[in-house]
Image: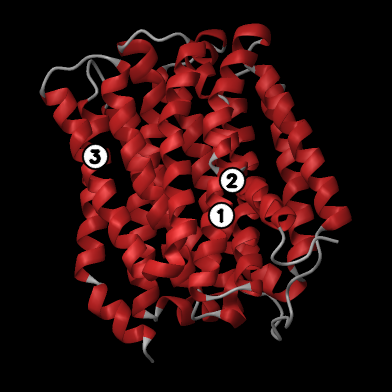
């Protein structure tokens, strides 16, 4: 069995958390080809992203409270099984409508990994120590958006888009086997009440009434929304507007994603010294700088992939500093409701991300202005939230 504090457990939790970026980023190089082969429009193909994100958000409402009652491990195994079946349906899709539905169920299964990974971290750690663990998970997890588009570009070029979903089925089966054989049950005290709509509402109301939780929720949500604007728009902007091939796009997207790995790695090293708030402050400034640099690049007439990728790398470095600390801060007050706190945060975060991605796809046309504007807005909003809620978070933390 994997023991707390070991890199092996951290790596497994990172892999579970990486389901979302892996499932989204790996098939990004294939979006134009999927549109051609299935006879779909760009907005229809964009819906395969939005459907996944909506399901990923909605599904999180249930996993947390159910795992608070029945344990993390059995609920996680069920979630991974659903993910594998839905990924197989994606590979076998014969129309864009079938792919959209399959992606929805893929999101329902995939969201269990990240909800339960966060709940397991809160079962084992608290405060800055939880922030450090989530940052370590983030730095390992960041390999997914770095490697996924590269791997996706290779699979797309060599075997076509269906091979990407077959690969996800295999990855899901391997993950399920490791969880079944090696993951211990971390829930110490199970919720007394049976899971019901009223008990779930009670848990969520208790969590949402905490003002510090709402402040951390705002930080996590705004910063994350900028990421999904980039995910939704990058493939069409870099390939259709800037002329990159699927393979070149995979590398360009991976270069941007290195920023997240860098930010999360720095946060893991510095958060015990700077604290959650100090680390989020550095990250919030970095997010705003990255977003505004993206706007400046377009305003100055730069038309190369690097002019977008490098500012995004800065933005994602800020995200790597902010997101793990915001999650840790949000969940620290709720050791007895770690699953519910994780679920509510994930639901709001993913819902806003889905809207951000859909808005980006809807607005994109002959230039990259919509993408840059939304990324910059989210970066600046994160900084404003951090500045305006510092006293609130500090006062609640003292009680």
> Residue visible at 27% across and 39% down?
375
> Residue visible at 18% across and 25% down?
297
Mark 1 vs mark 3, foreground winner is: 1
Q: CA distance from mark 2 to mark 1?
A: 6 Å
Residues marked 1 and 3 touching at CB (< 8 Å)? no
Which of marks 3 and 2 precedes in the sequence? 2
Q: Is residue 347 visible?
A: no
- Quadrant of the image occupied by residue 210: bottom left
Mark 2 vs mark 3, foreground winner is: 2
Residue at numbered disc 1: 136
Q: Is residue 183 above or below residue 67?
A: above
Residue 73 position within the rendered picture, expressed as x and y whole percent measured from the top left: 78, 62
Q: CA distance from mark 2 to mark 3?
A: 24 Å
Looking at the figure, which quarter contains the N terminus?
bottom right
Residues marked 2 and 1 touching at CB (< 8 Å)? yes
Mark 2 Cα shell of 10 Å, populated few (<14), some (14-19), many (≥20): many
> Residue visible at 11% across and 22% down?
300
Residue at numbered disc 2: 140
The mark tally for this picture is: 3
Q: Is residue 239 above or below residue 15?
A: above
> Residue visible at 57% across and 37% down?
143
- In this picture, residue 4 sits left or right of residue 311: right
Q: Secondary structure at mark 2?
A: helix
């Amino acid at each position: 069995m994997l023991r707390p504090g070991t890199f092996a457990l951290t790596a497994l939790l990172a892999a579970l958390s990486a389901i979302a970026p892996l499932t989204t980023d790996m098939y990004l190089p294939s979006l134009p080809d999927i549109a051609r082969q299935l006879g779909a429009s760009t907005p229809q193909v964009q819906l395969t992203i939005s459907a996944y994100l909506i399901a990923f958000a909605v599904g999180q409402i249930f996993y947390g409270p159910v795992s608070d009652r029945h344990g993390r491990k059995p609920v996680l195994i069920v979630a991974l099984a659903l993910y594998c079946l839905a990924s197989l349906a994606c590979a076998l899709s014969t129309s864009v409508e079938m792919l959209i539905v399959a992606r929805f169920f893929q999101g329902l299964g995939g969201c269990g990994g990240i909800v339960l990974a966060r709940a397991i971290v809160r079962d084992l750690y608290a405060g800055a120590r939880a922030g450090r663990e989530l940052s370590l998970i983030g730095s390992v997890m960041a390999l997914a958006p770095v490697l996924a588009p590269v791997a996706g570009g290779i699979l797309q070029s060599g075997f076509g888009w269906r091979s990407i979903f077959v690969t996800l089925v295999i990855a899901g089966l391997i993950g399920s086997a490791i969880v079944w054989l090696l993951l211990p049950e971390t829930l110490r005290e199970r919720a007394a009440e049976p899971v019901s709509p009223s008990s779930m509402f009670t848990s969520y109301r208790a969590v949402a009434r905490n003002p510090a939780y709402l402040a951390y929720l705002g930080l996590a949500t705004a910063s994350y929304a900028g990421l999904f604007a980039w995910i939704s728009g990058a493939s069409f902007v870099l390939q259709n507007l800037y002329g990159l091939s699927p393979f070149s796009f995979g590398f360009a997207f991976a270069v941007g994603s290195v920023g997240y790995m860098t930010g999360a790695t720095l946060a893991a090293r510095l958060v015990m010294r700077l604290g959650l708030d100090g680390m989020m402050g550095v990250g919030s400034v970095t997010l705003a700088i990255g977003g505004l640099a993206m706007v400046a690049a377009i305003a100055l007439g730069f038309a190369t992939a690097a002019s977008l990728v490098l500012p995004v790398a800065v933005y994602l470095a800020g995200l790597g500093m902010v997101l793990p600390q915001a999650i840790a801060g949000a969940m620290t007050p709720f050791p007895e409701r770690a699953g519910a706190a994780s679920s509510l945060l994930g639901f709001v975060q993913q819902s806003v991300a889905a809207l951000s991605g859909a808005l980006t796809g809807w607005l994109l046309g002959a230039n990259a202005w919509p993408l840059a504007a939304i990324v910059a807005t989210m970066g600046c909003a994160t900084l404003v939230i951090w500045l305006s809620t510092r006293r609130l978070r500090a006062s609640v933390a003292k009680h």
